[in-house]
Structures are given as C-alpha cells and as structure tokens.
Image (cartoon, rainbow, N blue to C red):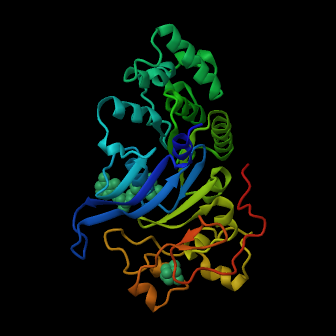
Amino acid sequence: MTETRIQSNDRPLIEVDGVTKTFHVAKSASGNSRLRALDGINLSVRRGETLGLVGESGCGKSTLARTLMMLERPDAGAVRFDGTDPFGLRGKELLEWRRRVQMVFQDPFASLNARMTAGEIIAEPWKAHRGLYKTSREREARVRELLHMVGLRPSDAKKSPQEFSGGQRQRIGIARALALNPDVIILDEPVSALDLSVQAQVLNLLNDLQQRLGVSYVFISHDLSVVRHVADRVAVMYLGRIIETGRTEDVFEHPRHPYTAALMSASPKLDVSGAERQRIILQGEIPSPLDPPSGCRFRTRCWKAQDVCAEQAPGSEPAGKDAGHLAECHFPLETLKVRSGELAPMP
Ligand SMILES: Nc1ncnc2c1ncn2[C@@H]1O[C@H](COP(=O)(O)OP(=O)(O)OP(=O)(O)O)[C@@H](O)[C@H]1O
Ligand code: SF4
Ligand SMILES: [Mg+2]
C-alpha cells in the first residue's frame, strides 16, 4: 500500500469543521428573525464506525443530517467528504458522491412511495446510476440479494409498502439505502417510530450489515439507550452545538457536561446520591434557538451555573483520558460515574 493510500485511509470519511446554519424565520418577541440551527459544529466520522448524534427535539440533529446530505448549505464552515468539499462537486463527481452517501428516514410509512412495489423502491436509485446494474436480470438478482440481506423474502419484491409492517418497511428503506453500495448511511431516528422489540431487531440488522459491509453510520436519536447500544462514538447536541463528544463508553461512563448527565439522569445506574440526583434531573424546555441564552447555552437549566457561564461561552476542552473526549463547560463534572456502563438494556 502506498503512503498516500495509507494517509487517505487514516483520514476520517466525513469532517465537519465549524459549520453554521441560519434560517430566516418570522420575528420573535425580541425582534430576532435569524434562527441559528447549527452554530460552529465540529465532528468527524471514520470508516466503518457509528457516530451517534443525540439531543432533545429542536437541537439541530436533522439540520446537521441534511447538511451532511447537501440538502442544506452551511453559511459558514466546511464539510469534507474523503477530503473533498461535496458542495464544489459537479457532473459525474457529484453523482459518485451521491452514490456514496445515503439516508434512512424516521417514518417508514411516509418515506416509501405507496404506488411502487418494494422491488421498484429498492431499484429506484439505479435510475440515476445506470452503469451499476445494466440488465433487468442483473437488477432483479440484486433486488433479491438486498431483500435477503435485510431479512426479507425474494417474493416480497412484488408487494407494495402497505402490505408490510413498520419494521419490515424500515428494512426496505435500509435495502434502498444499500442499493448503491454507499460508504456512509445517515439514519435520522430510524427506529423511533417502531415498537421496542422491533427496534431491537432493526438495530441488530444494522449492526450485522455494518460488520459485513464496513459501512459507516451517522445514527441520530433522542434516545440515549439506543445510541448507547449502537454507537462507537457519540456527540451530544444542545441548541445547535456539540457540547460533549467522545467514545461511547467514555461519555456514558464518565459524563463531564452537566447536560449529558442530565439527559442520563433517569438512569438508576448513575452513581450519585439522592439529593444530587434530584438536582441533575433535566428540567424545563430547551430555549428557542431564536433567542439562545448568552454565554453557555445550557445555563438556564444548569444546576452548576455561575456568573461566568452567562458572560463567556465555554470552549471545547479535553474531558477525560481519551484525547477525543471533549466537553464545553466551565465547571465539568468530576465525580459522576455510571456503575456498569449500561444505561438501559435493550430488549
Ligand atoms: N427549514 C427550516 N426553516 C426554519 N427553521 C428550521 C428549518 N429547519 C429546522 N428549523 C429549526 O431549526 C432548529 C433545529 O431543527 P432540527 O429539525 O434540526 O432539530 P432536531 O434536533 O432534528 O429535532 P427533532 O428531534 O424534533 O427532530 C429548530 O428550531 C427548527 O425549528
Ligand atoms: S458552562 Fe456553566 S452553565 Fe454551562 S454547563 Fe458548564 S457549569 Fe453549566
Ligand atoms: Mg429531527
């Protein structure tokens, strides 16, 4: 293997560097109409890993996903895919990038065209990528193979989405995302609409597919126990910023940001006394991103806030033994531990 090849494989597949995204909306009570959905996001996704993105509703998870899919253009900062800015690509290069990055959506009922069969849905991405499977025989064989990979039967190709359960529909969505042999799949709340037992089956399927294909996932969820189960690394979002990131075991066993601990506060395995536990229970609503608090954005809900938190936004600081564990807090938690590391067992 050449040196250049080694360097290129060491580089993260996706790098997000200082990305900001503002929407122009109706004026708020304070007269502000610029809603900053993403505010200086930095993250990376490596080959074959799962990055879990977690945070409350409205914190910017889907906007970040849409930016990674080039459905939103950042107003500042850069997104690089394999070292290249996808927003600068045209023609064949753009088509090739589109092949490599796929998405699975939350709602398996709304995301599949009811007028098409499962086979047609899975084969649809090939219309734009005609070179991949040239004959109808090749395409039919590949549809059968993809159905098998996601645990469905070859005969299911002829059925329409209405004939499937929610979990089976999500399997079709996953097969469609795999149809172009992507390098990364962005999954935006892929199991939130499913029953618990079905969730576990779909998560196990995703895990098996990753082992087999080496595909990377950006896995978005508001559910910490799901992220704990699937992610190699995790990024915790709050009001358009990543406030803590690191290896999943580091963040879950030694949360350093009060917001991360507050999100985890429902877990009986969080090693804190009764009084302290009462204080860290997450209270109140997430403030509007139209009028975010000054300084640290979490300060209006933080039990550790002091004057400096209102005056100065904390920077991203090393938060643990692992160099990749970072937290944005003036007074990171010192002693909090999670006893077994498991938040909540999956069914
Ligand atoms: N196209 C848009 N125009 C205006 N505001 C938007 C737009 N898209 C998102 N927003 C706002 O940006 C913020 C972040 O939204 P986003 O959908 O990314 O959050 P989320 O974390 O995915 O939430 P949820 O968990 O509910 O899906 C929200 O305040 C939302 O109202
Ligand atoms: S910076 Fe201050 S307000 Fe923000 S999380 Fe840390 S202690 Fe709380
Ligand atoms: Mg969302």
Looking at the image, which residue is at 38% across and 20% down?
127
Residue 232 at x, y percent in the picture: 64, 53
| Residue 22 visible (yes or no) | yes
| As drawn, 59 above or below 293 | above
Residue nearest the observer in this picture, 161 or 121: 121
Q: How many marks?
A: 0
Residue 323 at x, y percent in the picture: 61, 67
The N terminus: image quadrant? top right
| As drawn, 261 above or below 151 | below
Residue 62 at x, y percent in the picture: 43, 52
| As drawn, 298 above or below 133 | below
Q: Splitting the image into 4 quarters, where does residue 110 fall? A: top left
The residue at the far front in this view is 2
| Residue 193 visible (yes or no) | no
In the visual, does 40 lie left or right of 45?
left
Looking at the image, which residue is at 56% across and 48% down?
10
Looking at the image, which residue is at 29% across and 35% down?
90
Q: Splitting the image into 4 quarters, where does residue 338 fall? A: bottom right
